[in-house]
Amino acid sequence: MREPILFVVTGPSGSGKGTIMRAIIAAFKDIVKVATFTTRLPRPNEENGFDYNFVTAEEFRAKIEQSEIAEYEQVYHDHYYGSPQFDPNVGPDRLMELDFNGMYKYKKTTKRLVSIFIAPPSLEVIAGRITRRSQEVNLERRMGNAYEQLQQAENYDYIIINEDFEAARAEALAVVLAERLKRDRERRATLIKGMCEPR
């Protein structure tokens, strides 16, 4: 059995991490996207059950009480975000969006976690992307959170600057492929060793 990889993607609001994650899932059909929970409303083009599991605050609290949520944060001082309860060391390779706090928590218990930080080329670009995407009522909080997220980028395995989407997409796919090849190296080396045994 292959040891599963948990690919964790983090990035500030407006960094384009959702689009890059969709590109990863489109390219690697056997990777399972883990949809986290949030109490905020869906934006246009967001899919319930894929981008997030959109729930009410009451439903979120009930899931915490029923141990269906492994870890959670109140982000931007208004909405809650949390990850579903599952064993990252069993099953298929998975892809999940987490902030840096969630990434650190999973890193403690996950045997093979690969962290990818998606960053914009500048804070000005983040502000522009957020305002174009929707009229956020908490832009100032999102910008403060973006700065906090960016300060943690150096602690990630990979950093991708999403200035040109096609270039960022290519880098993200290269990361996934390289990490899967690294994971499979031992199995392939054993196969080759068997080829070299005297007949």
Image: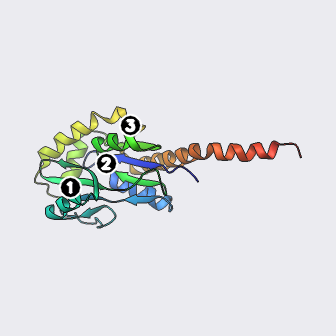
State which mark lies toward you, 3 or 1.
Answer: 3
The amino acid pointed to by label 1 is: Arg
Q: Secondary structure under badge 2?
A: loop
Q: Nearer the viewer, residue 102 or 45?
A: 102
Q: Nearer the viewer, residue 174 or 99?
A: 99
Q: CA distance from mark 3 to mark 1?
A: 28 Å
Disc 3 crowd rating (10 Å Cα; few below 14, some 14-19, many 20+) is some
Residue at figure coordinates x 71%, y 44% from the top left? 190
Residue 113 point in image, percent of width and height: 44, 44
Disc 2 crowd rating (10 Å Cα; few below 14, some 14-19, many 20+) is many
Residue 84 point in image, percent of width and height: 31, 57
Residue at figure coordinates x 22%, y 57% from the top left? 64
Furthest residue toward left: 137
Q: Secondary structure under badge 1?
A: helix
Q: Quadrant of residue 123?
A: top left
Q: CA distance from mark 2 to mark 3?
A: 12 Å
* Tag 2–tag 3 contact (CB < 8 Å): no
Residue 89 point in image, percent of width and height: 46, 50
Residue 131 point in image, percent of width and height: 18, 53
Q: Could you say which disc has been placed on residue 98 in the image? A: 2
Of the 4 image quadrants, the one containing the N terminus is bottom right
Q: Could you say which disc has been placed on residue 132 in the image? A: 1
In-image side of 61 versus 180 (left or right): left
The amino acid pointed to by label 3 is: Tyr
Q: Secondary structure under badge 3?
A: loop
Residue at figure coordinates x 13%, y 44% from the top left? 141
Q: CA distance from mark 1 to mark 2?
A: 23 Å
Q: Which residue is mark 3?
A: 156
Residue at figure coordinates x 17%, y 59% from the top left? 61
Q: Is residue 197 visible?
A: yes
- Choose the circle earlier in sequence order: 3 or 1: 1
The amino acid pointed to by label 2 is: Leu
